[in-house]
Amino acid sequence: MDYDAIVVGGGHAGIEASLALARIGFSTLLVTQRLDTIGALSCNPAIGGLSKGNMVREIDALGGEMAHLIDRSMIQFRILNRRRGPAVQAPRAQADKFTYNRLAKETLEAQANLALFMDTVVDLTLDREQKRYQGIVTERGHHISSRVLVLTTGTFMEGKIFIGEWETPAGRLGEQAAIGLGTALRAKGFPVGRMKTGTPSRVRRSSIDFSAVEVQEGDRVMAPFSFDYTSVDRPSEDCYITWTNEETHRIIRENIGRSPLYGGKISGIGPRYCPSIEDKVVRFPERDRHQIFIEPEGIGTQEMYLNGVSSSLPEDVQHAFIHSIRGLEDAEIMRPGYAVEYDYIDPLSLYPSLESKLVDGLFIAGQTNGTSGYEEAACQGLIAGINAAQKLKGEKPLVLGRNEAYTGVLIDDLVTVGTKEPYRMFTSRAEYRLNLRHDSADQRLTRKGWEVGLQRDEQLTRLEEKLDRIEAVKDLLAARSWREKNALAALKMPEITIDVLKETVEGLSDFDEPTLYQVELDVKYAGYIDRQQRQVDRFERLEAMEIDPRFDYDTVEGLSSEGREKLKVVRPFSVGQASRIGGVRNSDVAILIVHLRRGGGRV
Amino acid sequence: MSRYDTQDIIYALATPWGRSGLAVIRISGEGCRASLSPFFSSPTALIEAKNATLVHGYLLDEGNARIDEVVLAINTRGHGYTMEEAIEISCHGSIAVIQAILSLLGRIGMRSAEAGEFTFRAFIHGRLDLTQAEAVEELISSVSQSSRSLSLSRLEGRLRERIDELKESLLTLLAAVEVQLDYSEDELDEFVFPRHALATLIESIGSLADTYQIGRLYKSGAKVVLAGSTNVGKSSLFNLLLKEERSIVSPYRGTTRDYIEADLEVGGIPIRLYDTAGLRESEDLVEQEGIVRTERLIGEADLIIYLVDSTDLGHIPAEDGRTLVVYNKSDLVRPAADTLAISAQSGEGVDRLLKAVEDRLKRSLPDIGEGDLVIEGERQWRLLEGAKGALVRALELSDSVDVLDVVAVELAEALTNLGELTGEVRSDDILDRIFSGFCVGK
Ligand SMILES: Cc1cc2nc3c(=O)[nH]c(=O)nc-3n(C[C@H](O)[C@H](O)[C@H](O)COP(=O)(O)OP(=O)(O)OC[C@H]3O[C@@H](n4cnc5c(N)ncnc54)[C@H](O)[C@@H]3O)c2cc1C
Ligand SMILES: Nc1nc2c(ncn2[C@@H]2O[C@H](COP(=O)(O)OP(=O)(O)OP(=O)(O)O)[C@@H](O)[C@H]2O)c(=O)[nH]1
Ligand SMILES: [Mg+2]
């Protein structure tokens, strides 16, 4: 055996997976097509955002890397939705792309137990029954073996790029596609399909008329994503806002037939939540303008990202419509927008551990599973890495609940319901989002990260100290009064903030901001949190009824035939998961419960 | 899936609404005795009762006021139909009493059972013989049909459509809020909370929920009691209304000793009519017991027809929403002009009386037109009320934009309630609505 573990692909998923495996102590090899593009931000130069910022902090709490990378490369920081309520606020940062991707590579290089190798994987070798993973075969003919594999191919597996009538096999513009692996996996019986996504053009900073666009500044105080430190010191760059207009839309409409999508060249399914500008114009004809954010790609680079006008129209059309936009009349396009179509593997073929049901020892993560987005990829990579390590150790996989983490919601959705379009996280996907605040990710997950061997003892101690401080603040408030009222009770009133109390309640200002903020939210949301907790309790009871994934559903009498088929496909880990499968009826779940109670769930 | 949760304490009325002198309400679930004991006059007796014993006492409300005199039949864990700790409450059969008790149970954290849920629990706890696979399948399919859409089968045609419409409007509203939470402020147009749409929705759900009383009345009927002093002609009127000689009529006072009941219909409303022992001071033990029963019936009645003998007025009670004072024997003495007068002998004025009874029963009900939709089931009503309650809270909260996240919690709760009526709503449905209705995404 050459290595304990191999990770294919140095994208956001592959970075987390390989670091997790190596940090837990397994000899790991990362094979990727180009070392120079490890951790490349293919699209938007930003990390975080609504629900995604929460995921970054979840990754950090479990012992992943993404938060550290963005904390050391951010060039603008903002807390989004300050006015919408704490449960849905989230941090977002603009990244200096070049710094981000250099730091990613340096972090991997500095990691013990981790080897990096530049090559393209074209096939897997399996055992004679085609049931167990054994090793990889690369383009240059290397055969490398390992006990487990994590596959994270992103947009590269049989990737194809489109700009108008022009197309080329690539995963990102100028980067070769990984040809062969998709075909090999199809031949081995994997459910491989096509998806597509797109990116806008980058224009030259010096060609933008800044007097004609609005400025969007970052927050004055930058805050770290990672729980490992309390402040960050980074430069803050502005972003800018402009709008499309009727003329822009006219140009797009007149040329719509030349789009590869509308012209029928692309068969893959694209994301509805992240439509190209041609999609927006066609689907919302009543709107006379669409917003565009102009974001820097880094410090020292001239490239500016046009957030909002992703397009795969021919380059002459892209030129024409961009030049019709205020402030961009003379914009010099440095890279055109394009669409990319790629192979993904139906995530219904995975267990909640992200291990394949078809091949033992094979884990799959990231865009390969039909998701889109850096954070979505990274959290899966981390979980796949952790679970590959758990498997090597012979321990139970780490499966996060829908009530514990957005990461849990994401993976549960993927492996239980599957996805028809590139899957992106939204706060509305989480039933218990009051519990999934970004500031509480450490409380939810640090201990789990420690249990699987990723978090160190100091982080656990840090968490315990934080919990102690929270209790101390609550005790202090309970003991003090505010205008003849108990201070803790006063805090329940909507207009009384912790800042108000700080002015009069002695000793309160000795505590740090994050602690005070948590107490404030805990107290103000107590009623809702309690109510949600009751729902969570119910939810957890069904989750706690485990089913062995190898369980033979044919031995259970009385299941509906559709339910039985679906259960056999999904092979849920728990009754709770079973109940979320489309086509599984309540009666099927009831029968399962009875069966399990009578000791029938084990194999 | 919550409906298969066997940890909750569930309850259900086991006898038909208002149709019998006695009603039985079943409760099942671990801890049900402890939950009920604070609201029972002899809490210790209830908690310590052995399996298969009876405990007599009063159910009390939160303010310690008596709701009704009841007998509780106790099953401890491992016994009884469901094999769970269980209570059977035998109480008086009036709609008012049943409502009060059910509402108390709901308030103290118990849950109205789904159809078939008691059977389901019996099944889960191995009470039913499951060795025959066929029987299992049959049972399961009956449980499932009723639970997945308990109401689906019942919610036929237009009512279902109506609830679907309400759900649609709510979904649209929720999507409008959710999009604000899924995307950041600066990606979206200025947000104006759809206050008006929400208020309209609250009204629509409210008026549908209010039809429950009508439905209940038409479905379960009303309890109407003939009362008054002896010899005023109660039995005569009873026989006249039933068009048969059911009750003994005589010139002697105190002829009717125990109550007699019979069914009839007035203006489409099913009615259970009671002829009772006349009210007077009496030394006779049997008659005294009869009078006690009359008083109890008066307590439970939806409507009391209080008969007065025009030739011998005696005590005349005050009229109220539940009491109709009627002057009998109008053939002998001409009663005052603005009174409701009849002759149980000639039948004069009886049509007016029937109209008055119908009006009284319908008076407290909301207006509905011919063919309007009406909610019939207690569960449907409860879910609609639950949805309305959540929406009202959302409306109050929405006045401060800061808490859009909790407004969304309330809207989602309302949607879950409606979802339980006509099939659940998944988060995907909300996202679909967002993507089709809003131009979002960079
Ligand atoms: C054009 C474009 C548009 C996008 N638009 C959006 C968007 O609008 N919204 C959004 O949220 N996200 C978008 N993204 C997606 C975002 O970039 C990805 O979701 C994220 O980077 C996925 O991470 P990953 O680790 O799964 O894969 P990637 O970041 O794609 O990394 C995969 C890595 O694996 C390597 N690799 C692949 N196959 C092999 C092989 N066989 N052998 C060796 N190495 C291999 C590749 O070279 C690459 O380095 C877009 C990406 C692209 C390219
Ligand atoms: N003239 C006349 N006599 C009536 C009328 N209604 C009842 N009576 C007579 O009044 C007497 C008492 O009638 P009941 O119907 O037995 O009276 P009751 O109220 O049931 O009496 P108790 O059962 O004793 O309480 C009988 O002799 C009836 O015939 C009426 O409208 N007109
Ligand atoms: Mg009589």
Image (cartoon, rainbow, N blue to C red):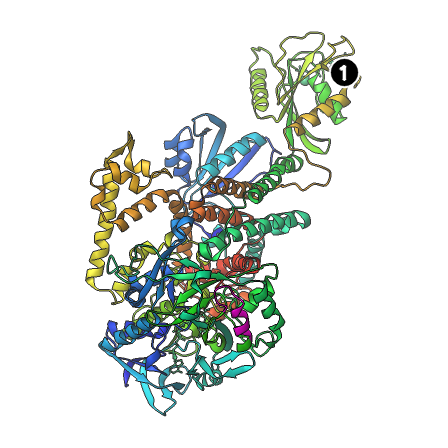
Question: What percent of the width, then of the height, locates residue B340?
Answer: 72, 16
- B234 with respect to A582 (left or right): right
Q: Can residue A590 be seen from the camera position used here?
A: yes
Is the CB of the residue bearing disc 1 within 8 angstroms of ligand 2?
A: yes
Query: Which residue corresponds to the image point at 64% horizontal and 36% vertical from the top-left?
Result: B220
- Closest to the observer, A48 or A400: A48
Residue B26 location, x and y as percent? Answer: 50, 40
Q: Does residue A600 appear in the picture of this structure?
A: no
Dot 1 crowding, Cα within 10 Å, few <14, some 14–19, many 20+: many
**Vertical relation: A503 (above or below) A55:** above
Residue A326 is inside the magenta segment: yes
Q: Nearer the viewer, residue A21 or B224?
A: A21
Q: Judge whether residue A33 is colored magenta.
A: no
The answer to whether B57 is drawn above or below residue A217 in the figure is above
Write the start and end of the magenta stretch as one range: A317-329
Provide residue B274's location: percent of width, then percent of height: 65, 25
Residue at the location (49% across, 84% down)? A168
Instruction: Report the residue marked by disc 1.
Output: B343
Q: Residue at x 22, y 49 (%)?
A: A468
B357 vs A291, left or right, is right
The residue tagged with tag 1: helix, strand or loop? loop
The chain to which mark 1 is attached is B
Q: Amino acid at mark 1?
A: Ser
Between B241 and A85, the one lying in front of the other is: A85
Residue A247 image point, x, y percent: 58, 65
- Left or right, B173 with reference to B330: left
Which image quadrant shows ligand 3?
top right
Above or below, comparing residue A317 to residue B52 in the picture? below
Horizontal side, residue A76 vs residue B58: left or right: left
Residue A576 position by quadrant: bottom left
